[in-house]
Image (cartoon, rainbow, N blue to C red):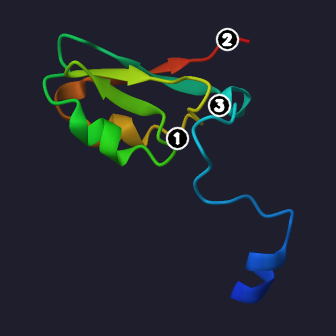
Amino acid sequence: MIISEEEIKHDAKMLPVCMPAFLDRSKWNSVAPKVNAKRALDPYPGAMSCPDEAITVENGKMKINYSACTGCLVCLRETPFNAISEEKVNR
């Protein structure tokens, strides 16, 4: 079913593409990124690529806000030197 742009704008059931980082999305993911501090020589590509703004850079190091992370792992693909790995979330 194809819907128009007008229907997307006014449908209350549709989720926004990017939600604010203060909303808890930790239950959405089955995997989460894990930072390898020794390999994270350039933390900025991972932080800038996160669509949920769950990664920040503090003192030159990546910090992941797991309550904002949806587990999309875009950061894993965009961060050089395999600085981020995939970790299964245990609930």
Q: Which residue position is annotated with label 1?
A: 72
Q: Quadrant of the C terminus?
A: top right
Residue flagged by tag 2: what amino acid is it?
Asn
Cα separation, mark 2 vs mark 1, equals: 16 Å
- Depth order, front residue of 68/76: 68
Spot occupied by residue 6 in the image (x, y as percentages of width and height) = 75, 87
**Label 2 – label 3 distance at C-alpha:** 10 Å
Sort mark 1 into few (<14), some (14-19) or many (20+) by Cα contacts within 10 Å: some
In the image, what residue occupies the spot 42% across and 43% down?
50
Q: Mark 2 points at which residue?
A: 90
The amino acid at mark 3 is Asn
Mark 2 vs 3, N-terminal side: 3
**Residue at 24%, 12% in the rendered image:** 37
Rendered image quadrant of residue 75: top left
Q: What element carries label 2?
A: loop
Q: Name the residue under label 3.
A: 29
Near mark 3 (Cα within 10 A), the count class, few <14, some 14-19 or many ≥20, is some
